[in-house]
Each structure stands twice: as structure tokens, then as C-alpha cells.
Amino acid sequence: MSGPVIEVSDLVVRYGTATALDRVDLTVGAGELVALIGPNGAGKSSLVNAVMGIVRPAGGRVRLNGRAALVPEGRQMFADLTVDDNLKLGAWRRRRVPGARDTARVYEVLPELARVRGQRAGTLSGGQQQMVAFGRALMADPDVIVVDELSLGLAPKVTAGLAEHLRDLNRERGLAVLLIEQNARLALELCGRGYVLEAGRIRAQGTAADLLASEEVAAAYLGGPAGDVAAAKEAAMETAKETAKETAKETAKETSP
Amino acid sequence: MKPSPRWAAAAAVCAAALLAPLLLSETQLPVYIVLVLAACVVTGLSMLMGYAGQVSLGQAAFFMIGGYTAALIALEELPTWLGLAASPLVAAVLAAVIGVPLLRLRGHQLAFATLAVQLILLNLVGQQEWTGGDIGLQGVPRLAIGGYEFADDVAYAYLALAVLGLTVLITRNIVKSRPGRGLRALATSEVAAESSGVPVAGYKLAVFSLSAGFAGLAGGVYAFYFGYVAPSSFPVLLSFEYVVMVVVGGAGTIYGALVGATAVTLLLQLLNNIGTMEGMPAAAPTVLSYAVYGVLLVLVVLFMPRGLVPTAAAWWERRRSARPRGDDPASDGAERPAPAPASV
Amino acid sequence: MSDFLQYLISGLAVGCGFALLASGLVTIHRVTHVVNFAQGMFAVVAGLTAGSFLSVGLPHGLAEVAAVAVAGAVGLLVGLIAIGKPGTSAQSALIATLGLGFAAYAVEIMIWGDNPRSHPGLRGTVEIAGAYVQKQSFLVIGVTAAVFAALLAFFTRTYLGKALSACAANPYAARAVGINVTRMGLVAFVLGGMLGGAAGVLLTPLMPISYNSDVLLITNGFAAAVLGALNRPGLALIGALTLGVAETMVAGYYEASYQTVVALALMLVIMIWQSSRRTALQEEAAR
Ligand SMILES: Nc1ncnc2c1ncn2[C@@H]1O[C@H](COP(=O)(O)OP(=O)(O)OP(=O)(O)O)[C@@H](O)[C@H]1O
Ligand SMILES: [Mg+2]
């Protein structure tokens, strides 16, 4: 595969007159783990929905190079259907491919689900539902999986388990990941690269290490020391922009054939 | 002081309405009277749909109640004016009584419930001996008030106009009053209105029975004008017709009700003229009128969901504000469209 | 006793017709949240079309199936207009289907005129325990049972059926896995059209149908479906059978003209009873 799996450029999303995303650029390279962090209402879900074609952008471009699958915010079960049927519907985009609806491979990756396969999804616990949402996305046999809020409402241990799954899938199958996560530390530790989205715009981007080191990000998302935030912001923005350019070049090199 | 365009428009409409009976021909007058009576019913229904956010698919039932009330009283040799006075009261009281359980329903449930009420009433009226069964009540005497007998079509046209004027005035005052503002909150969200202290159930019941009262009064005039009432004069389709008029004109506005009733009636009349031309098949007028209802309703709902008047008003506002300096932008909001369409 | 049996069976047959109609209403409502006022029209169109097909010489069976297919196509057309335009709310869609019912009147009168029509179904009667029951009644009951079984299998066993259920359960998640929810809504309308059509071809031999029979048909279908809040086909079936039997009993033992009054009153009571267990907040949230 060549080139980034997700390439978003100049994306604008509006709801009526309110602008949720204002000229956003974002890329996810093949096999890359990318974090997207930002406060509530920043526009993260809007970005995800535009990428998945659920929301029609008002401007800009979304290019998918390969198949994307979504683990939607809030789990979003087909509550009346069984776990197995939920998983099977994950393969809808590949419904004409023979064997695409075989759920066995998901139970291999998420053995916890095998026990409840006949149960109605609406009756599962939150963590189990998140796993079903996960498995449903895997059923699409995606090149990139987009996770909107991995940890929402989950016990830390469950979150860690799912993060582990993601890492494994990335390592073993070369699955690219775009991870949206309130817990910025978790996200940045898992991913190599990250973006910070605020009020519909990309505020900072760079390698996870740089973002973790950035005072601004630390202050806003990691509960770090709050100094002169405004000044720190300026400084951090500068470094973030620099590193962003660097990484962009690098990823371009890496991903070109 | 320069008269505002709003007042000028109102004055022009009034003048045209008042002159019309004198100018219209013998064949046109009955159409005009039916149109004005429909406008009365539609004004009430428009308030129900626009403010209380509820659709009644059985509004013709109250029209029928008014008609039968007037006819029964007049045929009992009681003073005919008593029949006219009783027709809105009986309809409003009946609406208040059935409204208590019925208005717990909302949206499509209420729509079907009102439709059911009309079907039940039609059925019952068609069975009873004292209502004349399927044949109905014939030979209703002409209306007389204080020695003056309403004898010809012109007199009934002015009577209908007076009734419409009363309806419009009452509606206008209610909409502008404090409860009227509460009503407007109701249209957006019942829950929000309730939590901000609007007595939702009471207001809904009041609007429901008021709209029934308007329909009843119009029905009373109808009975005296035509001289008979029968179940077949008040079919379910008549109720649907009123809904079409409201939707076309725009729910929740007085002008919308008037424009809707007028536009639909005129269009139907035009097509009726075409349909009865020589060489047309016998079914042509019916076919054309149904086609008009259908096409009009679909087109308006899909492409002009707020109705003619609010859409035109919004267009006018935009044009005005696009100009460098608009004159008095803050006119009263009485005729503004209700924020939310009726929920079904 | 033999009267009772006769009323019961013919009541069940009529109820089965209502059940088919109601199941179409439920199918469409579940997937699209639209209350389809044109549901009764599907039955009228199919009933009258079947009569025409028979009169031009199509054999029984073929004529009825073709009429049901026509109703399916009409369902598609109604769906395209009611939900095809993006951003049409469920409220607007209901009014649109009301309008389409009117438009259909125009077409129906042009084709079939405005008198009630009927076509022969299965001729003859069967004697059971002294009661004479029309064979057509048994046909209606049998076909309805088969249709409901097929419907159940479709929704629980086939991939398309599950996708339809998925749209009903969670449209956002359905979109997330790539299901085109509008297209599924159209599939529901086609199904609804065919179910309404089946009701029409089966009922027309039992009771003549004219263009404006749709109001009574939709009201009865709605009354049946409302028992399961327009979402549960099983409850709709129970509601429809109860309604059919109750109406036939009233007509048989008491007075034919009161049968619809009984059905409608029953519907009102059920709706009001249900609403007393529900608050405005719940309804607005569910919208
Ligand atoms: N369907 C919608 N209609 C109108 N406004 C919307 C809609 N969806 C989102 N918005 C608005 O767009 C903005 C961005 O919302 P979005 O859901 O993308 O934020 P988010 O970053 O995902 O937030 P959170 O972390 O809380 O999930 C918010 O201001 C929100 O109110
Ligand atoms: Mg979000």
C-alpha cells in the first residue's frame, strides 16, 4: 500500500450556521498509530464522521486509501440484535466477498466475546459493548480503524486491555489507527504521532514525544504544571509547528514506495 | 405618521373581502361563502398546529357539530339566532370534554385519534333518528337576528365575513397576549415550556376547544345558508382539506390561514371550471381536485415546509435587510411563523 | 353456536387482512420512523389491480401476485417521495404520505371509476360444526400465517433483514458500518407496499373496495399496530385479530353499522391507556 490511508485536507464541517471544523488537515499513514486529542466540543467526532462519510463536509477533501472502519462514540450497539449479528453487520461493506461474514476471526482476537455471542447486545455491560463495537469494526477487515473515545465510561483495566488489542493489531496486521481519546497521556503513549484539535482547528501536532513534552499540551490535557499559559502556548505552538513539518516530511518519505 | 406596510396590507385585504360580495356573480358567491367559512375553521386549526404543535385530522367534526346544533335548534322553532350562538359553544364544550383524554396523545397518535373521533361521530349521526340519519336535517329556516332575516347570498356572505372577522380578532388578541407567548414556547418543546412554568395541558386544551368553537360557528352559518345538514356534507376528506389549507398557507399565522384557504379554494375552482368544460369526462372535476390536493400537499411539505406566508415573509425580510437601510425592522411579532411545525 | 364459529372465523380472516396492513405500517415505521398514511392505499391499489388482471384473463394466483408486485412498486414511489429528499422530517413525511393518498385517488378514479369493486376469490363454503364459512376466509388466514412466518424468517435469518433491523435499532451505527439508511428505508417501503397489497388482494373478495376505502383500512391497520407502539409486529398481529373478531361479532350479533365505531373506540382506549404510562419527556427524547 502506498501513501497515507487517511488524508484530510482543508476540511470544513458545518451544522446549520455553526462551524464545527474549520480547514482541518490531518493524515494517517499506512500502519501508523495517530492520536487526536482535544476538549469536549472541539470537533473530533465531526472529523471522524466526515472521514467515514456519515457527515457531508461543507468544504475540503477526505481521501481514503483503503478501507476505514469506525468504533463510534458511545458504543452504538444494535441493541435488539445478538452480539454475533452485530459483528456480522460490521462486514456490510464487504457483503459480496465470500466468507466476509465469518465472525470466527473476531472471536480469536476478542475471546471474551465468544461466550456472549448469542446474547442481545443491549444487555451487555459497557466494556463488553465497547468490545463488540471493536469487533464490529474489525469485521470490515479495515486498513485503518478509527476509534472515537476508547476509554469513555470504561474501567482503566478494560481500557488498557483494549489499548493492548490495538497495539497488537497494529503490530501483527499493520492496521493503522486514528485514536480519539480524552485521556491524552494514554493516547500519546500508545501512538507515535498526535494532533491537538481545539474549537474546530488543529492547534498543535507532532510526535507523541514532543506533544508530551510540550508545556501547553501538558497544562491543558495532562494535568501538568500550569504556568504562564499564554506564553507557554505561544512557545509550544511554535515547536509543535516545527515538529509537525518535520514529521510530515518523514512520514512522506516513509510511506512513499 | 406613515402607515406601515403591514397595516396597508391588512386594510387592502379587508377592503377586497368586503367588496367581493358585491362584485361576484351568482355562481361565484356560494364558493366565496364556503371559502370564508373554511378560513374560519382553518384559522383555528392553524393555531392548533402552529402553536400547540398538534394536528387534528378531524376538524370537520366540529364544523359538523356546529351545523347540526344550529339546525336542530332552528328546527325546534326556537329563535334561529340562538342556534347560531349555541353552535360554537356546543362544539367548544364537546372539544373540551373529549380533549381531556385525547390531548394526552401527541403527534401521529393525536392525528389518528381525531380522525377516529370524526369517523365515530359521522357514524353515530348517521344512525340516530333525531339527527335525521343518513338523510340529515332538511328545511332549516333562514337565520333572523333582531327582526332582520338573512335572505340572500350577499347577506350570508357578509355574515360569514363577520364571523371570520371575529375569529381573526380573537386569534390575534390571544396570540399577542401573555398566554400567547407561552403558547409559542409550547410549539418548540412541551418539556421546555412545562419546565418554564407554562401550564401546557391547560393551554393545549384551551386552543383545542377554541379551534373547535371557530369550526362550530362556521358550521352554524353553513347550516343556515344551505338549509340542510347531512353526514355526507362533512366527510373525512373535508378535514384533510383543512389540513392542506393550513400546510399550504403556513401553520401558526393568521395570514397563512387566510392565504391557504383562498389559494386552495381558488385553485380548486379553477380546475373545476376546466374539468367541467365540454368534452371532459364526467369524473374530471373530482380527479383534478384530488390531484391538486395531493400534489400541492407534497410539494409544499417538501419544498416549502413552513408554508407560503412564512416563506414569503422570510424572503421579504432578507431582501429588506439586504438593502442598506430598512425601515422599522422591529414590527410586532404577532404574525410571525411559529418556530416549530406541527409534530406528527 | 354455529353462528359464533362462523363469525369467529370470518372475523379472524378480516383481522388477518388488518394484520398484513399493520405489519406493513410497522415495517416502515421501524426503519424510517414515518407513519405511512398511504398504507391503506396500497391495499386499494392491489385489490383493484388484481381485479383488472383477472378480467383481462390472467389466471388466479398470477393475477394476485402481479398485483402485489404493483403495490410494491407503488410503495417504492411513495418512499422515494416521502424520504428521498435529504432532511425530510418524519412529520413532513407523514403529511407527504397523506398527500400521496390524495394523488392516488385521482389516479384510481381515472382507472377504475368511483364505485366499489370486488373480484372473485376462492369460491364456495366449508361446513364446520353447522357453520358455513367461506373458503376465501381460510385462504386469507393461511396466506397471512405464511406471510408472517416468512417475514419473521426474513428479519431474523437474512442479512438484508438484519440490516433493516439494524437501521431500526440504531441509524447512526448503521451508517457507521456503511449501511445506506435511506436505501434501507426504501426497501421498507417496498415491503410495506407488498404487505399492504397482500391485504388488498385477499380482502377484496370478502368486502368490495373503492378508492376511498383506504381511510377505514389505514385506521384499522393503525389501530392494530398502535397496540405495539407501531414497532412490534407480533403485538400488531394480536391487535389486528382482536379487532377483526370484535368487529365481526358486533356486526353479527348487534348491528353492522356499529362495527367501525367499536374498532375506533377500542383504538382510542388503547392509545389513551398507553399514553397514561408515558411522559412527554420520554416521547420528545425518543423522537
Ligand atoms: N448533529 C449536530 N448538530 C448540530 N451541532 C452539532 C452536531 N454535532 C456536533 N455539533 C456541534 O459541533 C461541535 C463539535 O462537536 P463534536 O461532537 O464534533 O465534538 P467532540 O470533539 O467530539 O466532543 P466530545 O469530546 O464531547 O465528544 C460542538 O459544538 C457540537 O455542539
Ligand atoms: Mg465526540
Image (cartoon, rainbow, N blue to C red):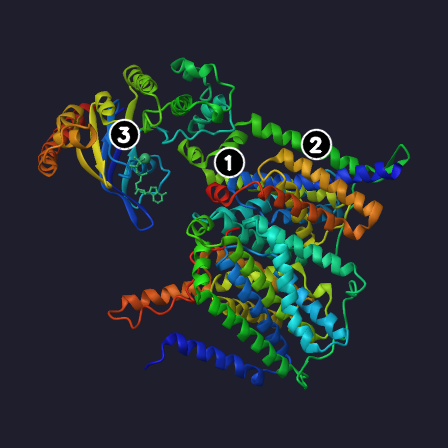
Real-space Cα distance between discs 3 and 1?
Answer: 30 Å
What number is the disc on residue A182?
A: 3
Q: Amino acid at mark 1?
A: Ala
Chain letter of disc 1?
C
Measured along the vertical axis of the image, is residue C252 above or below residue B308? above
- Mark 3 beta carbon near ligand 1 (under 8 Å): yes
Q: Residue at x 31, y 20 (%)?
A: A156
Amino acid, disc 2: Ala
**Is residue C210 at least partly visible in the picture?**
yes
Q: Nearer the viewer, residue A92 or B43?
A: B43
Circle 1 Cα neighbour tier, 10 Å, few/some/many (<14 / 14–19 / ≥20): many
Q: Residue C159: x and y, percent? A: 52, 27
- Labels 1 and 2 positioned on one and the same chain: yes
Q: Nearer the viewer, residue B169 or C78?
A: B169
Q: Can you see residue C113?
A: no
Secondary structure under tag 1 reads: helix
What residue is at 76 percent from the left and 69 percent from the top? Answer: B137
Q: Is residue A120 left or right of residue C244?
A: left
How many numbered callouts?
Answer: 3
Residue of label 2: C145
Q: Nearer the viewer, mark 1 or mark 2?
A: 1
What residue did someone put label 1 on?
A: C168
Of circles 2 and 3, which is in front? 3
Q: Are marks 2 and 3 on the same chain?
A: no
Q: Is mark 1 within 8 Å of ligand 1?
A: no
Q: Position of residue C111 (x, y in %)?
A: 67, 56
